[in-house]
Image (cartoon, rainbow, N blue to C red):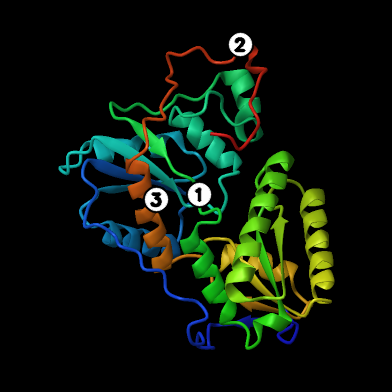
């Protein structure tokens, strides 16, 4: 990669004054009766560090992690861990560590937790057609599932603070948020709409001149991947008419996920935060806030394996819904 082409900043610039006010997040030492089921991909040290921060922030509230993309076995094992906790869990609050609630993986998680009637067509429709639907997780407790990061104020504040560290004059710069697209094209459109709304809130918080969102397609065919990279590069060129471009990767870890975004932006003179999203104390604060909100929600577990599932598996609801 040409060093002069992609400017990677390692957070060397201090955050100026009170441009981004710190978000005061009061976290109770424990949420009585609640076990927190954290959902996410996992797999590297940044995830481990983030989970350590989450457990420390939640204090006495038991936390179990189900890693992988809608891994039924991992979810069942995590639920069993919460059920066996000496903290006397009476409700499970699932908190997804994902950028957007519009996600094929989260659709499958909702199915496995009994919140959604049918599995995700985009991820597992073909397998279901031949082998039947995957078994849902079993638990004696009520289950609720919170939203993903979406445009939560804590997440907006975190991204704005990071973006401001890449610029001396945000009013002359444009903001770009880049992530990896969901599997299905319909969910990608919904994902982009949500991230565009997030980018606009970050723009307002940081005082940037403009904001846009982009999605890279990885693992869904070379043609789709190449098209998404071409669209990203065109978007950056358009944004440069608004000023210098400050980019943030919405992928959780580095360097592997981050390098996808960096490689796609090579040669475009983009100022970019070198980190993935994790680890960050703001994410742990967001999980704690989500868990507290989830503790007040009624049971969402409306479907169990004994319920009839879709004759012929022909009728799937819109992707992304609860």
Name above or below for residue 184 compared with residue 256: above
Q: Nearer the viewer, mark 1 or mark 2?
A: 1
Element class at badge 3: helix
* In the image: residue 52, left or right of residue 47: left
According to the image, label 2 marks what residue? 311
Q: Secondary structure at mark 1?
A: loop
Q: Position of residue 242 (x, y in %)?
A: 80, 76
Q: Nearer the viewer, residue 292 or 91?
A: 292
Q: Which part of the image, by quadrant, shows the N terminus?
A: bottom right
The residue under the point 33% across, 40% down is: 296
Residue drawn at x 66%, y 72% is 247
Q: Position of residue 162 (x, y in %)?
A: 54, 75
| Residue 121 appears in the rendering | yes
- The image position of residue 191, as x and y in percent, is 66, 48
Residue 4 located left or right of residue 109: right
Q: Which one is in front, 122 or 151?
A: 151
Residue that sits furthest to the left in the current view: 86
What residue is at 32 percent from the left and 45 percent from the top? 36
Q: Which mark is residue 290?
A: 3
Q: Which mark is residue 285?
A: none
**Disc 1 or 3, which lies upstream in sequence?**
1
Q: Does dot 2 land on a helix, a strand or a loop?
A: helix
| Mark 1 / mark 2, whichever is N-terminal | 1
Q: CA distance from mark 1 to mark 3?
A: 9 Å
Residue 148: which disc? 1
């Amino acid at each position: 990669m040409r060093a002069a082409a992609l400017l990677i900043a390692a957070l060397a610039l201090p955050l100026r004054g009170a441009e981004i006010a710190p978000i005061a997040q009061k976290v109770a030492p424990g949420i009585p009766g609640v076990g927190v089921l954290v959902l996410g991909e996992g797999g590297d040290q940044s995830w481990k560090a983030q989970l350590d921060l989450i457990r420390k922030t939640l204090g006495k509230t038991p936390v179990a992690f189900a890693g992988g993309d809608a891994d039924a076995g991992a979810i069942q094992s995590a639920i069993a861990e919460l059920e066996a906790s000496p903290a006397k869990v009476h409700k499970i609050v699932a908190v997804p560590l994902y950028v957007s609630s519009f996600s094929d993986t989260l659709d499958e998680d909702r199915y496995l937790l009994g919140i959604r009637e049918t599995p995700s067509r985009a991820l597992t429709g073909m397998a279901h057609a031949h082998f039947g639907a995957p078994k849902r997780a079993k638990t004696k407790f009520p289950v609720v599932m919170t939203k993903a990061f979406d445009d939560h104020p804590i997440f907006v504040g975190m991204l704005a603070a990071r973006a401001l560290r890449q610029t001396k004059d945000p009013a002359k710069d444009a903001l770009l948020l880049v992530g990896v697209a969901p599997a299905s094209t319909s969910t990608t459109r919904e994902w982009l709409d949500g991230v565009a709304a997030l980018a606009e809130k970050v723009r307002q918080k940081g005082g940037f001149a403009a904001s846009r969102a982009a999605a890279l397609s990885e693992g869904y065919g070379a043609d789709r991947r190449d098209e998404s990279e071409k669209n990203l590069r065109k978007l950056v060129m358009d944004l440069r008419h608004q000023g210098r471009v400050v980019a943030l990767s919405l992928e959780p870890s580095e360097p592997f996920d981050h390098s996808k975004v960096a490689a796609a932006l090579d040669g475009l003179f983009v100022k970019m935060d070198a980190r993935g999203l994790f680890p960050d104390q703001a994410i742990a604060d967001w999980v704690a806030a989500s868990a507290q909100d989830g503790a007040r929600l009624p049971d969402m577990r409306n479907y169990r394996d004994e319920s009839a599932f879709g004759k012929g598996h022909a009728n799937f609801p819109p992707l992304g819904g609860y």
